[in-house]
Amino acid sequence: MTDTALSTIAATLYAGPPGDFISARDARAKAADDRELAAQIKALRKPSVAAWVVNLFAQERTAQLAEALRLAEELREAQADLDAVTLAKLGRERRTLTRRLAQNATELATSRGERITASTLDAVERTISAAFFDPDAAAAVASGRLVRELDPSESVDLGAAVGGGTPEAPAPAAVPADEVSARRERRTAERALHDAEQARERAERDHKQAEKAHSDAAARVQSLDTRVAELEKELAQTTKDAARARTAAAATAESEASAAAHLADAERDESAAKDALDALIRAQSS
């Protein structure tokens, strides 16, 4: 009975205005009929501002927080069957949910007249994130009796993190067999969808690569066709030049033959003239 009364009183104190915690705690301890209970109330530690924000949210938005923690538990159970890509996607979604809940919690605290700093908001977000990863942290957050903020990288000591008695981890909700089967089928369908999406993405990449290869090949063919046309044009011009050169060479050969004949005639005339001169000289000498 004392433990139940203590946890109930602690929950009320830990969700009350932070500035009034000490006076409210002492008043409740003084009003307690049970000396042991009074001592336990008196020993309650003042929560940090971040812890108070989470406590207020846990008590004012119980259903919203419970639903988020239930989803987090399902993710922890399912992640062993998921691949790295899906886990990364779920991680991003979990961070988005964490930020949204932390923002909602700080807005609720602000509506109570408290000023919430950026560092406090960060501490609230880390505390909720810890609850998503660790069942003990989830129990501490759900209790609404946090004394200090939590961190996902630390193991949770419930006795040190929670005031007014150690909370029990919430028992898993009884899930009908048909819902269990439906969840299993949904995860199987989600994995199949993910595999199909990956296959489609690979096919799209292959198709784009094939399109690029075809475009490159078509451009190469066009370039080669252009070069062939240029070479054919050059060949036609070269053929014409060769024909003209052959004609010129033939004409030159004829000119050369004619010149050679004229040279032979000149040489004969020269030889005859020389012989006549020599005969004339011999006649005059005699």
Image: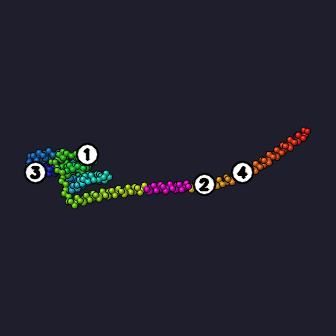
Specify the segment rendered in magenta: 210-228
Q: Earlier in the sequence, mark 4 or mark 3?
A: 3
List the residue tagged with mark 4: 253
Residues 273 and 189: in front is 273
Which residue corresponds to the image point at 84% horizontal and 43% vertical from the top-left? 274
The answer for how far apart the CA atoms under marks 3 and 2 are is 110 Å
**Residue type at the position of mark 3:** Met
Labelled pair 3, 2 in contact (Cβ < 8 Å): no
Tell me, yes or no, whether the highlighted magenta stretch contains residue 58.
no
The answer for how far apart the CA atoms under marks 2 and 1 are is 79 Å
**Residue type at the position of mark 4:** Ala
**Residue type at the position of mark 1:** Ser
The answer for how far apart the CA atoms under marks 4 and 1 are is 102 Å
Residue 110: x and y in percent read 24, 52
Which residue corresponds to the image point at 17% horizontal and 45% vertical from the top-left? 159
Q: Earlier in the sequence, mark 3 or mark 2?
A: 3
Q: In which quarter of the image is the C terminus?
A: top right
